[in-house]
Amino acid sequence: MTDDLTLYHSLYRIRRFEETVLDNFSRGVFRGTTHTCLGQEANAVGVISHLTLDDIVISNHRCHGHFLAYGGDLRALFAELMGRSTGVCAGRGGSQHLHWRNFYSNGVLGGTIPIATGIALAEKLKGTNAVTVAFLGDGALGQGVVYEALNMASRFRAPILYILEDNRIAQTTPVEIALAGSMSARFTAFDIPCAERDTSDVRDILPVSENLLNQIRQQKSPQALILHTCRFGPHSKGDDTRPESEIASMKASRDPCAIQASRLNPEERATIETLVENEIREAFQQALNDPSPQTEESEGTEY
Amino acid sequence: MKENFTVLDSLNHALSRALADDKQVYLLGEDLLDPYGGAFKVTRGLSTAFPNRVITTPVSEAGILGLATGMALRGLRPVVEIMFGDFITLGTDQLVNHAAKFRYIYNDEVKAPLIVRTPMGGRRGYGPTHSQTIEKLFMGVPGLSVVAPTSVGDPGQLLYDVIMNTDDPLLFVENKLLYAVPIMDFTSSQEFILIRREGGGSFSTPTYILTIMGAPSPVLTLAAYGYMVELAREAILRLAYEEEIFAELVVPTRLTPFEIEPILASMHRTGRLLAIEESTLSMGWGSELLARLVEVSSQKIKAVRRVAANDHPLPAASTLESAALPDVETIIRTARDMVRGS
């Protein structure tokens, strides 16, 4: 479903989820930490919209948008972040550690990439037609295990699409300070073809990701897509050291929701936004009323 | 059992059987392909017999462990060989933060049946980075079991059982000196009586108890695993014949989660426990074992001691390496002190 209305609904739903999480952190509804994908919503929607039920998504610490684009439930995600028994993982995982159907995320940068590669290889060995999509950020490029995985993905021809979301900042460190050399050459050095787009428009991402996914299904080998993007929010909750003006300028020119909203007439836009507000409010309130998980008596005694 | 059927033969046959019996079993590791067949030859012949399911990899321990964890999450049964146990530190993040955690943090909705086989241990002059016994670094990791075969019992069957039955990541520690040791045949032994105690859990990880045939009631329990069982067995014979100190030897195959009952029961019979390991002394298996025994014992304990390696890196030179590692003489001397006082 990639009509303009559906796309806007998906983007705006992620946007409002993330804003609701950040707004309520200071009220003590959530504890621990969280990493929102404000400004990067188009990547999740533009790639995951093409996937079938058999396909697999591996995500990272910034996983809420990927999870919701995959079809994940708003209430279950709120509940997981609130530590409720109705959460995606019944409260054991929290913000960064989600699993539902063929969706997996984990919180150590880069560590998921060999696992995603192994998942893709397993599906190929089993003879399924499933494609695996693995999301990583520019910060993960500092991790050596990523390159071990890329090398093996190429040697073993794993049917996987690596999506590198380059939001140009790793926590507080600009990419210019942390990264030497070329991003795309990191993939092509291993003979993994790499496409690259500098866009926040979901309509730019849809065709390129569809094309790459089709190639992977036919050729049974890896591909990479670099999506240069913008992170509007802090790394986690309040740790943004960038000047306000820089963020304001990104929001003015690179807002995936605003770009997609411009394709709708005002009535359509208002209808969707009202629908999403209601969805978010209900899901949030339900999760808030849900019970906390209880410890089983035997738990933890085995060791 | 065939004459001179070694621990290595036993493990090799077990891998072959697992590959033959279950198409979900894959072997991954460095230099596994024939004619080399792995650095210690445990996988010899397997890439010829099962060319599509023995995958030789680049030198990427973290990458291999991640790859295999992904395969395990999707229904396969990967068995990874890490060429030297020392190198497993390269994959620690994959084991600790990924493989061992997934089942729990994903609310028991996934399984990760990953077997990691690796040789540990010294006495071959390989030096500080190819001789260590460092499984203790992984023994406190929830979600990760640590299992060690010995020449006692059936090491191949142990490996086969864990490959076929585990639902969770498991570290299978093979002391490299054990490879050449013949499997002990206790049915015709004139010296030892072997008792097997079954462990709990979804697969069999027995504990073995060795006593000397015809000996009086033992006054000391030795607990050891891996290659230290060879030395401890020699020690209890010499203690009996040379010192008239009668000891029994308890040999667990599952190191964590702890199976303390058979060791506790033996210590209740003897009142004394000596924990023997090849790892360095501090913060190890023996420390944990003694702590647990002291916590739960309902009887008076006469003496507990540990024998382990010195707390410094293992040197390469033969004289220095021998001095750093626990030997039969140290076990005998410590046992004598525990029973007679120094």
Image: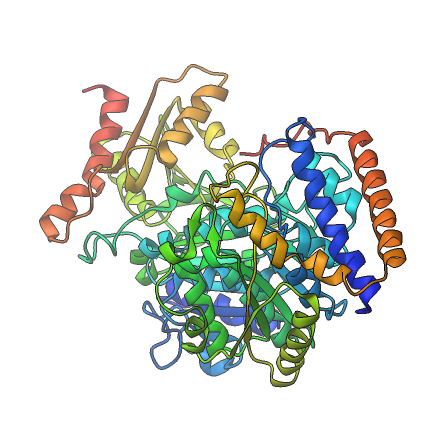
* Towards the viewer: B336 or B320: B320
Choose top left, top right, bottom left or bottom right for residue A135: bottom right
Image: B259 above or below A41 = above
Image: A285 above or below A187 = above
* Towards the viewer: A136 or A23: A23
Q: Position of residue B286 (x, y in %)?
A: 36, 33
Image: B290 above or below A221 = above
Q: Position of residue A113 (x, y in %)?
A: 51, 61
Choose top left, top right, bottom left or bottom right for residue B174: bottom left
* Towards the viewer: A81 or A294: A81
Q: Residue at x 66, y 30 (%)?
A: A298
Image: B261 above or below B163 = above
Q: Residue at x 63, y 50 (%)?
A: A38
Q: Is residue B158 left or right of residue A291?
A: left
Q: Quadrant of the N terminus of chain B?
A: bottom left
Farthest residue, direction bottom:
A218
What number of labels is visible?
0
Q: Residue A38, can we see it?
A: yes
Q: Quadrant of the C terminus of chain B?
A: top left
* Towards the viewer: B98 or A206: A206
Choose top left, top right, bottom left or bottom right for residue A237: top right
Farthest residue, direction top:
B300
Q: Position of residue A90 (x, y in %)?
A: 72, 39
Q: Residue B196, can we see it?
A: no
Q: Position of residue B29 (x, y in %)?
A: 42, 68
Q: Is residue A109 left or right of residue B123?
A: right
Query: How has the structure been colored for display?
Result: rainbow
Q: Residue at x 23, y 41 (%)?
A: B326
Q: Residue at x 49, y 68 (%)?
A: B15
